[in-house]
Image (cartoon, rainbow, N blue to C red):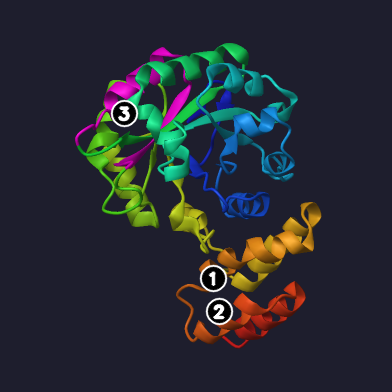
């Protein structure tokens, strides 16, 4: 896949997930075969106010050869200004979130709300495209609800407005992440545009990857929840033989975070990742309880080292 002047080799991308795709997790997934990882979604408005917590979401790792940032907002002027700001200077691709289903985002007329206002969505995309030479991509859903499945129309608008590629998650906003992904709508989107189309939703292993690619004919896939606690999913899809040592991955995750964040922040942030890493492990229930209440990260690592070492 090629997005404007940016070439991908494996066509596997870690999807943006709020509170999840931190710099460490992106770096780890890239080590296991992902071409790139997308940052957590970043508020253009918050950046315009120089919000420190929002700026921290823009930290990148040395092994991120293709740097992709995802921004969100509903003001074309603010979005354009951020696209040409120093904040995003180091990024190769700027993705616009028009698919987030979270009530807080939708109620603020952002994310997937924009699928209900195609005219505004187009203005935002055009303003961003005109503000930078970097490729502008758009991530959206099949529609807002079952009565408003407008992904094909929306995709065509994205292309007309100057987007260099699009990602479609085959669920409506009201579905959130429930039910099965609709591969038919993704397939129709691919048929109706000439820019690269990236499929998203329910890709968790080699079988679901092949099914999605073969059925939709999409150019690439984004993997989100399928990578939670399982960055090996990318290597599995690529058929690479690797050492799936979860303790080493956890240790690396924390070590990378320690380069950029305070111990206090990491202690709270890493807990959900640790529970995902432990998912599916036998006799892990007691360990989950221990690490959930243990405040000292070094002690957490000691507990996990013993647990995984005894397996």
**Residue found at x 33% / y 55%:** 207
Q: Which residue is the site of mark 3?
A: 190
Q: Depth check: give the residue in front, 29 or 151.
A: 151
The answer to whether one can see residue 84 in this image is yes
Please give the residue where the numbered disc 1 appears in the rendered image: 275
What is the spatial separation of the Cα atoms under label 2 and label 1, in whole angstroms?
7 Å
Q: Position of residue 209 (x, y in %)?
A: 37, 49
Residue 161 higher or lower than 244, as above or below: above
Q: Is residue 217 visible?
A: no
Q: Residues within 10 Å of mark 3 (few under 14, many from 20)?
A: many
Task: Check whether the beta carbons of the residues at disc 3 and disc 2 lie within 8 A of each other.
Answer: no
Position of residue 29 measured from the top left corner of the image (x, y, whole percent): 58, 53
Horizontal relation, residue 300 to residue 16: left or right: right
Mark on residue 107? none
Which range is magenta? Answer: 147-173
Q: Is residue 117 above or below residue 130?
A: below
Q: Residue at x 59, y 35 (%)?
A: 43
Which residue is nearer to you in this view: 68 or 212? Answer: 68
Q: Please tell me which residue is depicted at 75% across the width and 25% down the height of the picture.
A: 86
Label 2 with label 1: CB-CB less than 8 Å = yes
Query: Rounded to the nearest whole Å, what is the CA distance between mark 1 and mark 3?
Result: 36 Å
Of discs 1 and 3, which sits in the foreground?
1
Residue 99 image position (x, y, % from top left): 41, 36
Which residue position holds label 2?
Answer: 288
Which numbered disc flags the more N-terminal residue, 1 or 3?
3
């Amino acid at each position: 896949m090629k997005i404007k002047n940016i070439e991908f080799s494996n066509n596997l991308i870690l999807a943006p997930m709020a509170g999840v795709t931190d710099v460490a997790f992106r770096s780890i997934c890239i080590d296991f075969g992902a071409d790139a990882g997308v940052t957590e979604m970043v508020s253009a408005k918050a950046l315009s106010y120089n919000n420190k917590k929002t700026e921290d979401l823009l930290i990148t790792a040395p092994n991120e050869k293709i740097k992709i940032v995802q921004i969100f907002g509903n003001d074309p002027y603010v979005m354009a200004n951020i696209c040409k700001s120093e904040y995003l200077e180091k990024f190769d691709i700027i993705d616009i979130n028009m698919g987030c289903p979270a009530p807080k985002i939708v109620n603020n007329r952002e994310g997937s709300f924009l699928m209900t206002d195609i005219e505004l969505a187009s203005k935002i995309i055009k303003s961003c495209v005109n503000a930078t030479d970097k490729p502008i991509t758009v991530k959206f859903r099949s529609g807002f609800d079952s009565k408003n499945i407008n992904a094909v129309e929306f995709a065509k608008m994205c292309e007309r407005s100057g987007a260099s590629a699009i990602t479609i998650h085959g669920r409506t906003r009201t579905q959130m992440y429930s039910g099965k992904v609709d591969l038919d709508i993704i397939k129709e989107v691919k048929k109706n545009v000439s820019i690269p189309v990236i499929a998203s939703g329910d890709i968790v292993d080699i079988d679901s990857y092949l099914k999605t690619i073969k059925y939709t004919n999409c150019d690439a896939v984004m993997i989100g929840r399928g990578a939670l606690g399982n960055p090996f999913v990318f290597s599995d899809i690529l058929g690479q033989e690797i050492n799936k040592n979860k303790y080493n991955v956890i240790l690396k995750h924390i070590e990378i975070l320690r380069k950029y964040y305070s111990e206090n922040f990491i202690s709270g942030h890493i807990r959900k990742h640790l529970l995902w890493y432990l998912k599916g492990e036998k006799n892990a229930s007691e360990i989950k309880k221990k690490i959930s209440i243990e405040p000292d990260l070094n002690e957490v690592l000691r507990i996990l080292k013993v647990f995984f070492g005894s397996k």
